[in-house]
Image (cartoon, grey):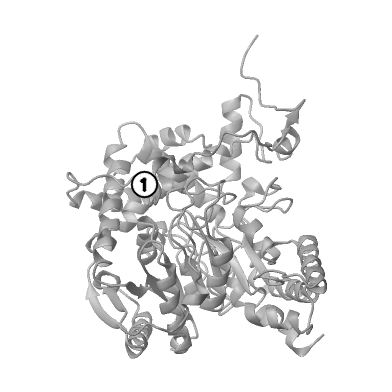
Amino acid sequence: MKITESQVRYVADLANLKLADEEIGRLSKDLDEILTHIETLNELDTSNVQPMAQVSFDADESATLREDHERATLGNEAALANAPQPGSGYYKVPKVIER
Amino acid sequence: MSARLESAASLTIDQVREGLKSREFSAVELAESALEHAQQENSKTNAFLYFSTDRALAAAEHVDKKIAGGEDPGPLAGVPVAVKDVIVTKGVRTTCGSRMLEHYIPPYDATAVKRLEQAGGIIIGKTNCDEFAMGSSNENSAYGPVRNPAALDRVPGGSSGGSAAAVAQGSTVVALGSDTGGSIRQPASFCGVVGVTPTYGRVSRYGLVAFASSLDHIGPFGRTVRDAALLLQTIAGRDEMDATSAFAPVTNYLAQLDGKVSGMKIGLPSEYFEGLGSETGDLIQNGIKALKSLGCEAREISLPATKYAVACYYIIATAEASSNLARYDGVRYTIRSDGETLSDMYRATRGAGFGAECKRRIMLGTYVLSHGYYDAYYLKAQKVRSLIAEDFRRAFTEVDAIVSPVSPFPAFKLGEKLDDPLEMYLSDIYTITGDLAGIPCMSVPCGKTAAGLPVGMQILTRHFDEAGMFRLADAFEKAGGFAG
């Protein structure tokens, strides 16, 4: 076993996912299979290989820096239009600070 | 309505231009007939999630006015277009095939959308797809699967299955899709249309809902190579709103469709011809014969890191996805489930809003990035990615293009592979490598199986050599390669 049910529960916690017990069972099996396949990467000696951090780039590092001009932003109303619970120009969430 | 307009959007872009110019039909008439066709077909294929009727008719009126006023209406004037529902459209619902965004109305347009409308294109609707573009069959959509227009009991491929189907069924002339691991080429192959994944950074991704940022691309579908090339032409090029969009000038692709492929060196990677379904293998071999008869020189090459591509991809793609999808937490995006604390609310919202495949990938991505595993998984995968890119770099010192199958098999039946995620992932082997290397690649129709199922041939070229790729695909298409 590459991954146990208790590890799956721990990862679900990290990922902020509430999962039903049957989902945990199913995911344990699926992730175990996938992680077993992923182990094939260990056949490759990569000790002298640089990681590929950039896909392709044809310009120097400063090329994407633009002039620092003021420009219009989305605006409060548009930014909140899709919020499930907007209020007084803010996003409302359950209380996080006791006073 | 003229006889020609009855077939509505089964025209090519050039035929639309001629029809508008000769006043055979107006842009509004064409848009109306495309909408009617798409709506009728939807009960069969479920290709569309939403029809943007008002926006389409307003855009078509604008084109008609320009024509009446003697102005240039643009290279895509009046052309009906479908847009995958992971690409945002201002004021037009964009769901990403997810319950999480069921009611999401974007406040802005993607750059690709803006550019194709500025060129006169008419967006008639948003197409169905796997949830957040995660899947190879379109069965992961929260709004039901798309059915393949060529065989309604089969999948259209994924994740851009709705866009491929919309073009294949003749509802639109072209469509936009997105590709992270094959999501344009594989459905193009399954549905029998042309699908293009341009070089990474060739098309701005501003407004493409992020799945895996180092792999995501926007690209076109068409029924002909020329139409797909023309759509790419209008959307490609540097965009200030996407820092990863490339500065390289955009070639005039249409000028390259000159049939001059004699002497072109074609590499056939031996690793891509193992384990092929026999009919797929025969069709691709026929296609290679057609290329040789056009004067191309074919030679066997090796891309030895290929067998590690799926493992490499599912680490990188899921790691990036787990970060990108963290934003759907019940605060900003339309859906919220109740929870006593903030943390309970996040968890409940995400547990209810995401489907099974998204959860699987978020979990895998979170696991490989979690404390203590980074070196073993993510760093290792990035190194293997270097080896895959190096394979291509080396191959392109010897050959001008690489030709291979797109998928080991043609469209499979709905439900057939749903219970085995690993098998589904492994079937992406031939398309994943191009995304990992960031090179341009496409699927061009290469005949049909005895049962009438389309099979696509993949062409891959060097970074930013879309022109060479289109030249070869166009010559192949004109030689009747698609007839099998």
Quarter of the image for residue B224 reads: bottom right
What residue appears at the point 66 percent right and 70 percent down from the top-left corner? B76
For residue B175, above or below residue B457? above
Query: At which x and y percent is residue B43?
Result: 70, 71
For residue B19, above or below residue B396? below
- Left or right for B142, reference B90: left
- Secondary structure under badge 1? loop
- The extreme top residue here reads A99
Query: At which x and y percent is residue A3?
Result: 33, 41
What residue appears at the point 65 percent right and 66 percent down from the top-left corner? B82
Amino acid type shown at disc 1 = Gln
The mark total stands at: 1
Q: Quadrant of the C terminus of chain A?
A: top right
Residue B192 visible, this orientation: no
Chain of the residue displaying label 1: A
What residue appears at the point 26 percent right and 49 percent down from the top-left corner? A39
Give neighbour class at mark 1: few <14, some 14-19, many 20+ (Cα, 10 Å).
few
Residue position for label 1 = A54
Residue B454 visible, this orientation: yes
What residue appears at the point 34 percent right and 85 percent down from the top-left corner? B262
For residue B34, above or below residue B375? below
Foreground residue, B329 or B69? Answer: B69
Query: At which x and y percent is residue B457?
Result: 41, 77
Q: Quadrant of the N terminus of chain A?
A: top left
